[in-house]
Amino acid sequence: MSQPTRNALVFGGTGQIGRALLARLRTDGWRILAVSRQAQAADDDGVHWLQGEFDDMPPLPDRVDAIFSTGPLDRFSRWYADAALACPRVVAFGSTSVETKQASADAGERDLAGRLRDAEARVFAAAQARDAQATLLRPTLVYGAGRDQTLSRIAAMARRSGFFVLPGDARGRRQPVHVGDLAAAAQAVVDTPATHGRAYALPGGETLEYREMVRRTLAALRPAPRLIVLPPSVFAVVVAAARWSGRLQGLSGAAVARMRGDLVFDAGPAQRDFGYAPRVFKPDAGMLPP
């Protein structure tokens, strides 16, 4: 006997995780209502697009079977706290930055960690108040769609210059996670009672040094840019000169410091509760911006 079609409300469907999640939900037979700030192409393959945003939401149904949020958790949490529609299941993405940036030397990063922490608490409280079940997913360093803010930015900079520079002590460990594995995790937890009311770190399937992560990223490009490793003192001078000339934006002192520190998380709870099994880090050119 076939199962009845389930209805999903998806936020962030045009983002890198959202696109991968929509594809999985369509394959699984969900009927999907997706909200986007920008007008999207005509509905296809079971996705019905609505134009709107959290501060100006279009009319929504009275009830859906699940809500998925793959965009900014802070904005979603504020909307969800006041939302009127009934929904027994909520799956929302946050970030491991809730832990890694709470003691950052950068005030903006500390503020981000605080907003993530408050947003998680707001989602759990709102779900409990309406007798719903929420699960929070915290990815590590996301890649795979060419739209992330780390590896894709590195690839873009290296393409322009033909090389990429790192300090010799950039040996902090990382666990890059593919967008497809994150979408699979969201699909898996929605029907797993063990995940109710819990938050999970979602690292990738391999732990490697920052420098090795960058080396593999550059090797995936054609032609492959050169990786230049400098003594830390020389690297600091190069970065200072690049900032002074206006050629380097977005690389804060805190970001450089994190290259030296481990950002490693335990996938054990996710593996135990819903069979999380992410892939190892093997980037190719199709996963990076052209």
Image (spheres, rainbow, N blue to C red):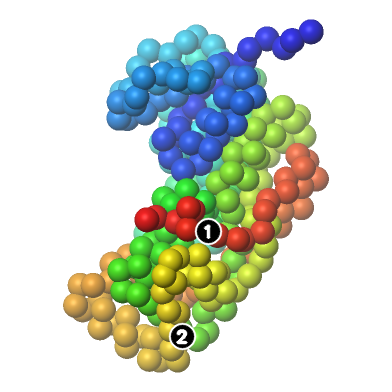
Q: Is residue 92 above or below residue 229?
A: above
Residue for point 66% across, 59% down: 280
Q: Nearer the viewer, mark 2 or mark 1?
A: 1
Secondary structure type for disc 1? loop
Horizontal and vertical percent for residue 8?
Answer: 55, 21
Alpha-carbon span between mark 2 and mark 1: 22 Å
Name the residue at 50% across, 14% down: 85
Please identify the quadrant where the C terminus is shown.
bottom left
Q: Tag 2, which secondary structure?
A: strand
Q: Is residue 290 above or below residue 65?
A: below
Question: Callout 1 environment at 10 Å: few (<14), some (14 to 19), or many (20+)?
Answer: some
Q: Are marks 2 and 1 in contact (CB under 8 Å)?
A: no
Residue 52 visible from this viewpoint: no
Residue beneath disc 2:
229
Q: Is residue 93 left or right of residue 232?
A: right
The reply to whether residue 29 is visible in this rendering is: yes
Q: Left or right: where does residue 229 sit relative to residue 195?
A: left
Numbered mark located on residue 284 in the image = 1
- In the image, is 88 to the left or to the right of 276? left
Q: Quadrant of residue 252?
A: bottom left
- What percent of the width, then of the height, locates residue 49? 40, 21
* Vertical relation: 22 (above or below) 183: above
The amino acid at mark 1 is: Asp
